[in-house]
Amino acid sequence: MPRVRVHQHVNPLAPFYRFAPPPLEVENVFANPQSPLFLDIGSGRGRFLLKMAEIEPERNFLGVEIREPLVVEANRLAGEYNLTNLHYEFCNASFALDEFLKNLPANHLQTVTIQFSDPWYKNKHAKRRMVTGDLVATIIEHLGISGEIFVQTDVDFLAEEMFAILRANASLNEIEIAENPFPVKTEREKSVEERSLPIYRRLFKKNSDLKS
Ligand SMILES: C[S@@+](CC[C@H](N)C(=O)[O-])C[C@H]1O[C@@H](n2cnc3c(N)ncnc32)[C@H](O)[C@@H]1O
């Protein structure tokens, strides 16, 4: 099966990407809508979630991705594998995540991952980076009690920037982790590890006294 060809990067601030998909209705996309939800933001080709959904049928997995052809192909694969606990959505997380998640049942979203988000190296492109205070606030708003946010990247300055933004939010506690807590590696993670380059990872947990 040839890989779907796509632009390497797209500008999340471009007018074309200022749209919101219809709000997620879990009962329309998952066979067991009451199962806890795992959200991967910037899911790329979606292979991480595909494997996770196979290994952990008791959870629902949702990928949001700004490059639509990848979403179409990932949903096609999920269908081919008969995975009814997996769905991908064409969504610009920087613009529309709040609207997309607004109908989620309370305490439903258990885990959020942001893995190897595009670094947008140049200062003049810094506004295109995914992890901002606003995005973190949106995630926390929808995250269930004691929900978790896991982030990882191989870009040192982006790691420091992301960790500082997450630490600055008083609703989160940082948890020490020695390694990736998940049994599956993303495509980018595998390629970085093959080159023996460092990966910077952190886990943050929502304060248990906050409601979802
Ligand atoms: C470097 S890739 C990593 C893909 C995958 N997470 C992995 O680790 O292999 C970053 C992904 O985030 C997506 N992305 C970037 N900005 C986004 C945004 N604002 N909303 C949704 N997806 C975004 C990109 O299109 C790309 O697929």
Image (cartoon, helix red, strand yellow):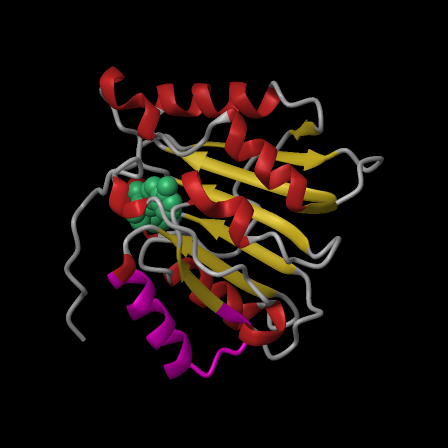
Magenta stretch encompasses residue 80: yes
Question: Dominant secondary structure of the magenta stretch?
Answer: helix
Of residues 201 and 138, the one nearer the viewer is 138
In the image, farthest residue toward the right: 209
Which quadrant of the view contains residue 80?
Answer: bottom left
Quarter of the image for the N terminus: give it: bottom left
Q: Residue at x 65, y 57 (%)?
A: 104
Vertical comparison of 3 with 109: above or below: below
Would residue 188 be seen by someone viewing this image from the given angle? no
Task: Report the side of 77 relative to 177 (left or right).
Answer: left
Assign ligand 1 to one image quadrant.
top left
Would residue 136 be seen by someone viewing this image from the given angle? yes
Vertical comparison of 181 with 47: above or below: above
The magenta span reads 69-86
Quarter of the image for the C terminus: give it: top right
Q: Position of residue 94 (x, y in %)?
A: 42, 38
Q: Position of residue 26 (x, y in %)?
A: 61, 68
Vertical comparison of 17 with 125: above or below: below
Q: Residue at x 50, y 46 (%)?
A: 97
Of residues 187 and 143, the one nearer the viewer is 143
Q: Position of residue 138 (x, y in %)?
A: 58, 38
Task: Report the side of 40 relative to 18 (left or right).
Answer: right
Count the marks.
Answer: 0
Q: Position of residue 142 (x, y in %)?
A: 65, 46
